[in-house]
Image (cartoon, rainbow, N blue to C red):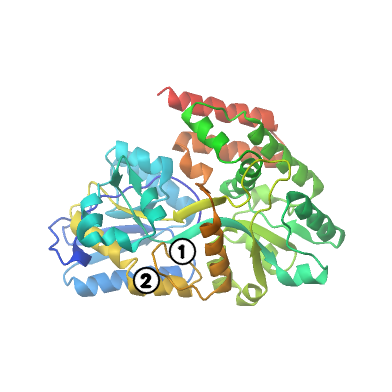
Amino acid sequence: MKRALRILCLCIVLVGITGMAFGAGGSQGGDANTLEFWHSQSTDPYPGIFQRAVDRFIAANPGYKVNVTIVQNDSYKQKLAVALASGKLPDVFYSWSGGPMYEYVNNNNIADLTSYMNANNYKSKFLDAAIAQATYNGKIWGVPIQNVSVCTVFYNKEIFARYNLKTPTTITELEAVCDTLLRNGIKPFSLANKTQWTGSMYFMFFATRRGGVQPFIKAVDGSGSFTDPAFIYAGQKIQEWVNKGYFNTGFNGLDEDSGQSRQILYNGDAAMHLMGSWFNSSALSENPEFAKKMGIFKFPRDEQGIGNPNTVIGTVGDNFYHVSSTSKNPAKAFEMITYLIDDLSVQDRLAAGAIPPVKNVKLTDPILAELFAQVQAAPDMQLWYDQSLAPEVSEVHKTTSQEIFGGTLSPQEAAQRLQDAQAAYRKK
């Protein structure tokens, strides 16, 4: 799942799957044989997938107990922030890599897993790009578990066929599709933007298709600025689409976690949904009938832009599980993580409509195969902005993005506010 953002920690020690003996330890504030484990995969079938993995660990380790806490995506971020501030972290939890993970490393919140990932070459199980995302300063800090998550456009093939619509390859063609849908009483896109990161996806694509990945890279490292024309264009395009009525009414007040945007799509009131590839799993479990008529296409190219149209936005791993540096039993904590991505868990994830971040998986689901083809054809991958940026800068990005959608902030003002936040962060 699901996208969103930073506040994660883990401390690790490997050996379980390598046949090496794991040392003693334990959970924060508990006994050495009890592990505290937090995750946010609250939508079926994932609670069961995680619990079965935990049960296999317990069966292989008599006398050990694992307390599993499941919290919804955005509540998870808040709960983790409190735990970080109080120093009371669970033994195992996850982050989305990027800026937040780097801060956890710098603040000594999570453990260096390099020796454990290298033991018996365990890291070779994973896609190279996933290991790269888990790496910082030459060391590995997390285990990629959940999914190869990229952002793409999901659409209702029946609605497209009804109005003789072809999947667009340019933004101009996409806008023509949207106009046809509006004339027939169908909202082009479903959107629930209360949590802000959903609208950020549109901002990222418009900016990346217009200017490529370099404007963002330069804005972050200080050699450029978030006032670059690509970011101004992204804000302008969003407001143009809002004014045209391309989104459902009240989108800024709707909650993605509770599925409000998905219901609009499922009932046919909207035809398209820009979302991370985890939506494939959501559709399969929530509305199998809709899943049968669902297709995807990559976000179209910008005819006036210089961005590569094959660039994807997302992450290779999605959730990176860590062991807290305060864990009393980091070795067993790491061993438990390995069960989350063992062969049985990989098969469970494939059946759930996800692409595990491991090598040599066989994809029979046509949506998954097409998603993976998008990743393989990509010359580069833009990590989600809200995960790339430092937490305080990320919050400014999400807030200003939402205000752009709401029309309460101009693209120029939003760009300057984000640039000011990044400049202030770099001065620290």
Residue 29 in sight here: no
Which is nearer the eye, 143 or 250?
143
Which is nearer the eye, 367 or 16?
367
Disc marking residue 345: 2
Q: Is residue 367 left or right of residue 147?
A: right
Disc marking residue 278: none
Residue depicted at x 20% and y 73%: 60
Residue 376 in sight here: yes
Q: Is residue 164 left or right of residue 168?
A: right
Residue 358 on image: x %, y %: 39, 64
Considering every residue shown, the one lying at the far right of the view is 183
Tag 1 secondary structure: loop
Q: Which residue is mark 1?
A: 42
Which is nearer the eye, 163 or 373?
373
Residue 151 on image: x %, y %: 57, 55
Residue depicted at x 29% and y 61%: 337
Q: Amino acid at mark 2?
A: Ser
For the C terminus, which image quadrant? top left
How far apart marks 1 and 2 lie (CA) works out to 16 Å
Count of residue discs: 2
Dot in front, 1 or 2 = 2
Q: Estimate how packed mark 2 is, as few (under 14), some (14 to 19) or many (20 or more) residues with alpha carbons within 10 Å.
A: many
**In the picture shown, does residue 353 fall above or below 309?**
below
Q: Estimate how packed mark 1 is, as few (under 14), some (14 to 19) or many (20 or more) residues with alpha carbons within 10 Å.
A: some
Q: Are marks 1 and 2 in contact (CB under 8 Å)?
A: no
**In the picture shown, does residue 390 fall above or below 314?**
above
Q: Is residue 317 left or right of residue 189?
A: left
Residue depicted at x 60% and y 41%: 212
Tag 2 secondary structure: helix
Upstream in sequence: badge 1 or badge 2: 1
Residue 216 on image: x %, y %: 54, 36
